[in-house]
Amino acid sequence: MDVTNLTIESILDGYKNKKFSVNEVVESYLKRIKRHDKELNSFITVCEKEALEEAKKKDEDLANGVKLPLLGLPIALKDMFSTKGIRTTAASNVLKDYIPSYNATVVDRLKDAGAIILGKTNHDAWAHGSSGENSDFGPTKNPWNKEYTPGGSSSGSAVAVAAGLTPIATGTDTGGSIRLPASFTNVVGLKPTYGRVSRFGIISMASSLDSIGHFTKTVSDSARILQTTAGKDGYDATLSSDKPKNYLKNLKNGIKGLRLGVPKEFVTKGLQKEVKNAFEGAVKILEDLGAETLEVSLPHTEYGIATYYVIQTAEVSSNLARFDGIRFGNKRTEFGDEAKRRIMLGTFTLSAGYYDAYYKRAMQVRTLVRKDYEKAFDLSSGGVDAIIVPASPTTPWRLGEKVNDPLAMYLSDALTVTANIAGIPGLSVPAGFNNGLPVGIQILGPQFSEDLLFRIGYSFEQKTEYYKQTPNL
Amino acid sequence: MKYTPVIGLEVHVELKTQTKMFCGCSADYFGKNPNTYTCPVCLGLPGALPYPNKLAIEWCVKIALSLNCKIKEFSKFDRKNYFYPDLPKGYQISQYDLPFGHDGFIEVFKEKGSTDVKKIGITRVHMEEDTGKLTHAIVSNEKVSLIDFNRSGVPLVEIVTEPDFENEYQVIQYLQKLQKIVRYLGVSNADMEKGDMRLEPNISLSKPNTKGLPNYKVEVKNINSFRFVDRAIQFEVKRQTALLDKNQTPKQETRGWNEVKNETVSQRSKEEAHDYRYFPEPDIPPIEFTEDEITSLKSSIPELPDEKFKRFEQKYNLTSYDSEILTREKGLADYFEEVVKVGKKYQVLPKQIANEIINTKVNTEEIFPAKLVEIILENKKTETVDESELFSVVTSVLTENAKAVEEYKNGKENVLQFLIGQTMRKLGKKVDLNAVKSAILEKLK
């Protein structure tokens, strides 16, 4: 059977109407992985045997009338997610032989909802990077043009969904690691509000910035997954105690009368012409759908990257300290250049005598960035419901193009990092193609406004239908 | 030359909460099989996150309040980054610039026998987590270091004083008071032998007629008994005096206490001092207390040893000696007051009850208050004994038991019980125990 373009909805419907079995679906995805992933390199580990065993069980469950929200849904997990009994490498040689003794909360929740793990996906080691090329397991290729990067750090998850190797894949977004690769591969990528989805069991990159999200073909699929992953777990102390909303309820309500802001700081700063054109086209479509668009200002945007690279590297340097060579089997010399660079930068900025000038200052700017957004979203003083921005300043670049220029690589996150700094949610949705390579836009909203982002994304997606296009492999 | 000691103290107190500081593992690790009380969190496995123990935080605040500290309404945890194999995350979750409690004090007597009081400033009271435990051993002819993570993540409260102590007597009083307080609060067993309380004095000497603190500081690490603190301070005062007399400045360093040699030994010098790269722990949101919450924690604190001691002296007309013994442990103090209540109906005086409890070391678990009153009344019906007869018997007992007498004089106070017993036997009569005791004490003077 052809699973290339299946969504969660179509898979679950298919089970219900007995169009196909779980076993058939899982087998078909595994077959596609076998056929295409040697070249794409989107998976680090494929759990063929376990997935087939699980599929059998789920077919029995279906026959027995078991009702679970994601029963029999195949999924892929970024290799930062701890999976009990399945090696979890963080795409680094340091952990190449590490098998966790426990599941991340999100993994437990997806499994409890009936999902089946197809495998663990590739990414920049420790989620450090914007192209996937920092992986110790080799770079992942963009299925739309294999000479190009799919974006990172969650490169494998984005590619696996785009290439139809899995209907959904999880990711982590610390500075854009979900939204950027989603926009480079024509899939939907969600970075939820900080504090909405548990970080427990997911290898920490930068604890105050890490957001746990996912890639799907469609916006409604994205909402379905969040419905399963969101909410308190008693293990992540930074989670909000507010109950998750119903993310599907208002999905189809349209966007007539919504006020959407276009921040002037995002559209002028070094934006590639092709991206600008695609973005303006998207704004036009949203206006046609009945939204009102207006210019807003986020004046501290220009300090985003600098602020991000101080806070993020400081936290990275501390979070990677546990990989001290005593446990987990491999020495610290196995760390790649990018991890070493960040450990050194972070150790420096936290050192006595430098803390005030770097870390403390960055935390102060962080507050200013957060206030920028709060002001922009303050409807009582002329603010907007949500903000629309491009997901990346450029279209995908060629593999190898930026590997020797870390700063250029860092700057590709310029349009995504401020959402992490402010802790707000962002949804990246496909917005067309340029020379056969995808372009995406991001919808940003106030904290815990995921339902609104899905509503806007859904309207846009229904109008544009880019999700119907698939790459020629 | 005569110098003035300048002494400060850091004390770590392990809390006896059921679970650890940041996970659900049992904190009752003592004597358990290695690495059986562990989970991804206290093992520092990739992806594991700390989830703070609310009760431990409240207990830390209660300790701070009991030490007359101010409580920060806005507080947070910080990461203290350093490498050591017993620290699985590569950092310890602690508190840096916003400890839960700060600026408190405790009062001690200046000198032995003096009634002059000295206020010892409490700089800060903060919460942190304990580390794992390293054991260096030989296994199959190979030198190995073994790590037990059962202790990893057990809640620890650190109490830091100002350098206000002038002698070891003040230090020991402070430690005894602190130990009593945490036991009264029921937040720690403060059992020295189990490592519930770890002591780190820092000692330097100030020259006569100088102002400010000395320009060096010697820290003595992880001492596990009050007696050793006493000795370590005495040793350091001597060692540093000798150096200063030779016009040398003692090295700023960390020293350890060698129990066998009864001396401190150099461990590491200031040049190797760590830069801990503290920064706010991003995995734990800041902690805020409302005034109401602090008030309610304050009201949950029982009467503390100092107050109880004073009240016992005044209300029950006890000597400070009796009052001190009876208030050492809250359980004993409560028992005493129960007996007093019952005794009142039978005209038994608190003083008599105090004597009975102290002299006979009553087993408070077995002998209920009413029973003790009965015993006291029974004892009252004693035969009289002629004072000269008593003294002659005591004299002969003391001569016959010269060895015991010597032991008593060397500080073995429980020998007294033995001597009382011997005297009673020789008298062959039921005599007032206290009369016998004072006769023996008189003779032993």
Image: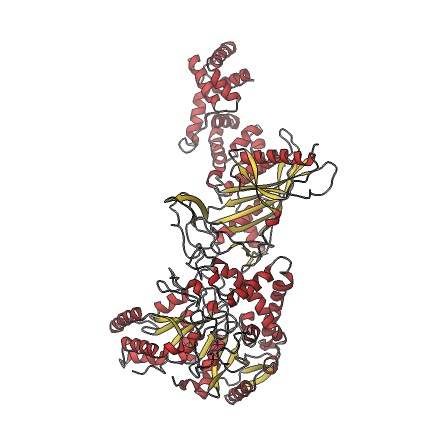
Q: In which quadrant will I find the C terminus of chain A?
A: bottom left
Q: How many marks?
A: 0
Quadrant showing the N terminus of chain A: bottom left
Side of B31 where A61 appears, left or right: left
Q: Position of residue A422 (x, y in %)?
A: 56, 70
**Residue at position x 43%, y 25% in the image:** B375
Instruction: Look at 39% across and 32% down and name the residue there.
Output: B366
Looking at the picture, does residue B128 appear above or below residue B222? below
The image shows residue B122, relative to residue A429, as above or below, that is above
Closest to the observer, B19 or B217:
B217
Mark yes or no: residue B432 visible.
no
Quadrant in which residue A249 is drawn: bottom left
Extreme-right residue of the structure? B209
Residue A223 in the image: x percent, y percent?
Answer: 42, 76
- Residue B40 falls in which quadrant of the image? bottom left
**Above or below for B322 versus A131:** above
**x%, y% of residue A189?**
46, 77
Q: Position of residue B338 (x, y in %)?
A: 47, 34
Colour convention of the picture: secondary structure
Q: Is residue A463 above or below residue A451?
A: below
Nearer to us in this view, A243 or B33: B33
Residue B97 visible in the displayed image: yes
